[in-house]
Image (cartoon, grey):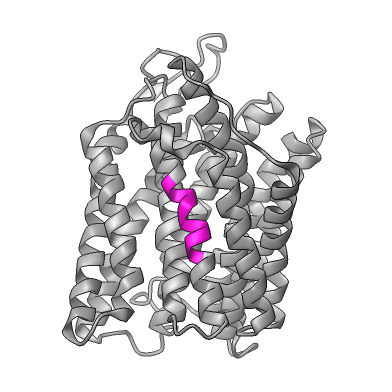
């Protein structure tokens, strides 16, 4: 199916999937999440991995970050920047080319294909700089200097990706650990910045529409402590991994994020799933950072607990929350989620909880929890794809282009 811009009849119609940045990348993110996890479960179950391929565990970490998470980040930024700048969204051939770059990286890193590592590195590393170039023009032209911070964060994500590849190429042993640490820190910073904008704004608007007190509390000192402590964790994690100082910084950040969230009236959103899922996703941030502090300060918490609370909890839930909301709003549909979508929210929460708690369970229950987490994760994204793949591939409900 295709859509065309009515006031520009001389231009060829744009395939719907490439009409706006959220369409291909929200679909690809939703597809990558269950497929990648299913592949990882198969590796754990069979112990099979191609000879000469990059290490299985580092491939899993890389693809969950640079395939699943980065696709969602791309979809969000390609949709938000036109709104911030009042410029035309990237579409048609340029968007198709950007999508092809993302796909090329995924194909090149498939372990069964045996693509030479230098070639795979070039293909995989190309996407984030290309995304940055696509976003830089509108941001700079519109004078949105504040939002150019996202370009710096994309640069840091590129550096994190490079660290993985340098390790795989034998140039920088240990680069995978550094790359994973840097990427997680950068994505957390994005969640802190974007979440701090959209969660209180959407909450305020929704409460006022219902005739309720829409006041959300935003204390300047809490905002500063939240963002500064979150930012400082990036160099601290790289320079002082496992150090008590980093643990104390994580504790400060956890408290700041919790205070921030408390001012956004989360209790008043419980009857609106499209709202409470945003609050739930953000709530995983202080929970994860508290677990991180407990781990680093010697409280006996496994490192995997805070890592998965942050990635499977905060990152994944915020991604699904934003993708479900933005897909409705930007296709001219009402901001009301269906029962399968709510089921997806609940299943994703169950998956994250099981993955976080698994290391604390005895014996065979550990593997049972892992299996349950994997099944819930795959089912959650199946719910997302069931509802939103047709929406992302269909024209806007209001007949407008985009």
- Could you tell me which residue is drawn at 41 percent across and 59 percent down? 313
Q: Quadrant of residue 393?
A: top left
Task: Give how far across and how far down residue 105 sits, in percent.
Answer: 49, 63
Image mark count: 0
Locate the N terminus and report the quarter of the image it occupies.
top left
> Which x, y percent locates residue 27?
38, 44
Q: Residue at x 29, y 58 (%)?
A: 34
Left or right: 66 as drawn, with respect to 325: right
Q: Nearer the viewer, residue 266 or 378?
A: 266
Q: Is residue 224 above or below residue 272?
A: below
Look at the image and say whether residue 385 sits in the magenta stretch: no
- In the image, is 266 to the left or to the right of 386? right
Compared to residue 398, the image places residue 256 above or below, namely below
- Is 129 positioned to the left or the right of 285 in the image? right
Q: Residue at position x 55%, y 53% from top?
A: 258
Q: Which residue does the image show at 56% across and 9% down from the upper left?
A: 7
Q: Position of residue 273 (x, y in %)?
A: 34, 35
- Above or below for 125 versus 134: below
Residue 340 placed where, x, y %?
Answer: 21, 38
Residue that protrudes farthest toward the top in the picture: 7
| Front-most of residues 25 and 199 | 199
- State which region is magenta: 280-288
Examine the image and state in which quarter residue 143 appears. Answer: top right
């Amino acid at each position: 199916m295709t859509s065309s811009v009515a006031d520009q009849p001389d231009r060829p119609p744009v395939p719907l999937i490439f009409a706006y940045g959220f369409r291909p990348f929200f679909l690809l993110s939703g597809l990558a999440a269950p497929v990648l996890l299913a592949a990882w479960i198969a590796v754990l179950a069979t112990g099979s991995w191609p000879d000469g391929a990059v290490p299985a565990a580092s491939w899993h970490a890389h693809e969950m970050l640079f395939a699943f998470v980065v696709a969602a980040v791309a979809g969000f930024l390609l949709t938000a920047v036109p709104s911030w700048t009042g410029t035309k969204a990237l579409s048609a051939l340029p968007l198709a080319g950007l999508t092809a770059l993302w796909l090329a990286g995924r194909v090149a890193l498939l372990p069964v294909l045996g693509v030479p590592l230098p070639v795979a590195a070039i293909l995989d590393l190309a996407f984030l700089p290309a995304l940055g170039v696509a976003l830089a023009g509108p941001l700079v032209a519109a004078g949105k200097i504040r939002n150019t911070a996202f370009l710096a964060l994309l640069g840091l994500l590129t550096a994190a990706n490079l660290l993985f590849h340098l390790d795989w190429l034998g140039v920088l042993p240990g680069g995978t650990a550094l790359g994973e640490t840097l990427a997680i820190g950068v994505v957390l910073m994005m969640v802190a910045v974007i979440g701090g904008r959209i969660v209180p704004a959407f909450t305020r608007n929704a409460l006022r529409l219902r005739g309720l007190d829409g006041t959300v509390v935003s204390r300047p000192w809490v905002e500063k402590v939240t963002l500064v402590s979150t930012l400082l964790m990036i160099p601290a994690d790289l320079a002082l991994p496992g150090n008590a100082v980093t643990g104390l910084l994580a504790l400060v950040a956890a408290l700041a994020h919790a205070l921030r969230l408390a001012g956004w009236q989360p209790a008043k959103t419980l009857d609106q799933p499209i709202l409470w899922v945003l609050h739930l996703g953000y709530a995983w941030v202080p929970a994860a950072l508290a677990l991180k502090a407990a781990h680093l300060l010697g409280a006996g918490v496994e490192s995997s607990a805070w890592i998965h609370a942050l990635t499977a909890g905060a990152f994944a839930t915020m991604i699904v929350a934003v993708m479900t909301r933005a897909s409705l709003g930007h296709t001219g549909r009402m901001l009301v989620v269906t029962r399968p979508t709510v089921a997806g929210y609940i299943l994703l929460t169950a998956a994250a909880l099981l993955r976080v708690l698994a290391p604390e369970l005895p014996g065979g229950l550990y593997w049972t929890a892992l299996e349950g987490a994997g099944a819930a994760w795959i089912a959650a994204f199946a719910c997302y794809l069931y509802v939103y793949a047709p929406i992302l591939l269909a024209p806007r409900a209001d007949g407008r282009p985009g």
